[in-house]
């Protein structure tokens, strides 16, 4: 009898533990669902595509971490790649659904060591035209790394006033080489910028890009300029000086709807590490897609 009583008590304890576990898990799941819903509710959901462009020697892999972070945060499930051949022909790999939300297009240049910025600008235009043809896009966001930013600046210089093309909405520049690259046309700590971003010396093609102020005026474009300082005394990300990246401010002046700079420091702020940096990715997500 005593054994049965002990067994009965044991069964009751087990049942209580199981019920407690179920309710705890359910509560935890609810809290997780609430957190996910709260995070997703902060996102601005639309069909404006965001185009990622890598730098010299890069590829779609250069954009992979940032794109995956956006997917992980629930920004989008719709990602495709636009491969640009050696002669500028565009192949869209993947398909965007008609009801796509915050779609991302990774651009990959097969000739990724193309130094002709005007040619790169034409190739970027080819991608836009192909997207316009297949998906009827009217505007787009841009994220560029390193030389990709200068190629895009050349695109805007040549096509920024063309109303028949999709119009720029938001722009993110990472490690922009707007006024030079270290040990190529600029030495360490050689060039500085003033409070307006005006460089103490202008390297080609910087003087030509001064026309961008006029092109950006009145278009309500928002700009985020990201750069890194590895804190070794060079005031650079190891390859591009902070002054070169920050000189974008003078090129655009007061023409954008908004302009902000975001500086990152340490090992993860190195030139090629910036696009692998979680803090950078989170900043981009907030700027492009949060309400």
Image: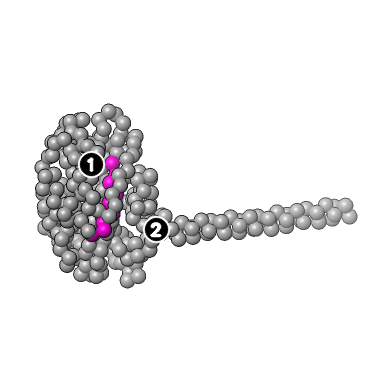
Residue at the farthest right position: 1
Question: Residue at 24% across / 70% down in the picture?
Answer: 136
* Residue 201 image offset from top left, x and y in percent: 13, 36
| Circles 2 and 1: CB atoms closer than 8 Å | no
Kindly state the secondary structure of the residue where label 1 is placed: loop
* Residue 279 image offset from top left, x and y in percent: 38, 44
Q: In this view, does 243 lie above or below 217?
A: above
Task: Tell me the tag on residue 196.
Answer: 1
Kindly state the secondary structure of the residue where label 2 is placed: loop
Between the C-alphas of marks 2 and 1, the distance is: 28 Å
Residue 179 in magenta stretch: no
Tell me which corner region of the image, top left, top right, bottom left or bottom right, holds residue 122.
bottom left
Q: In this view, does 196 lie above or below 9?
A: above
Magenta segment, prevailing SS (helix, strand or loop): strand
Q: Mark 2 points at which residue?
A: 291
Residue 103 or residue 68, whichever sits in front: 103
Query: Earlier along the polypeptide chain: callout 2 or callout 1?
Result: 1
Range of the magenta residues? 219-227
Asked if residue 256 can be seen in this view, the reply is yes
């Amino acid at each position: 009898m005593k054994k049965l009583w002990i067994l009965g008590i044991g069964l009751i304890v087990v049942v209580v533990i199981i019920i407690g576990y179920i309710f705890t898990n359910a509560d935890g799941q609810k809290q997780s669902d609430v957190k996910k819903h709260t995070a997703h509710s902060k996102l601005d959901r639309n069909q404006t595509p965001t185009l990622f462009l890598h730098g010299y020697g890069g590829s779609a892999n250069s954009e992979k971490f940032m794109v995956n972070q956006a997917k992980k945060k629930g920004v989008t499930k719709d990602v495709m790649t636009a491969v640009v051949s050696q002669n500028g022909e565009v192949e869209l790999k993947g398909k965007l659904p008609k009801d796509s939300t915050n779609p991302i297009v990774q651009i990959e240049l097969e000739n990724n060591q193309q130094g002709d910025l005007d040619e790169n600008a034409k190739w970027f235009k080819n991608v836009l035209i192909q997207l316009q043809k297949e998906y009827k896009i009217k505007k787009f966001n841009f994220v560029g790394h390193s030389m990709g930013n200068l190629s895009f600046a050349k695109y805007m210089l040549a096509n920024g006033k063309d109303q028949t093309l999709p119009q720029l909405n938001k722009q993110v520049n990472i490690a922009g080489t707007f006024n030079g690259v270290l040990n190529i046309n600029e030495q360490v700590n050689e060039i500085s910028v003033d409070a307006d971003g005006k460089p103490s010396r202008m390297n080609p093609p910087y003087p030509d890009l001064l026309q961008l102020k006029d092109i950006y005026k009145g278009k309500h474009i928002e700009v985020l300029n990201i750069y890194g300082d590895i804190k070794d005394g060079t005031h650079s990300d190891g390859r591009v000086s902070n002054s070169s990246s920050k000189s974008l401010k003078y090129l655009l002046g007061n023409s954008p709807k908004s302009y902000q700079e975001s500086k990152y420091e340490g090992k993860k702020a190195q030139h090629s590490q910036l696009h692998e940096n979680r803090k950078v990715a989170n900043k981009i997500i907030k700027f492009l897609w949060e309400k």
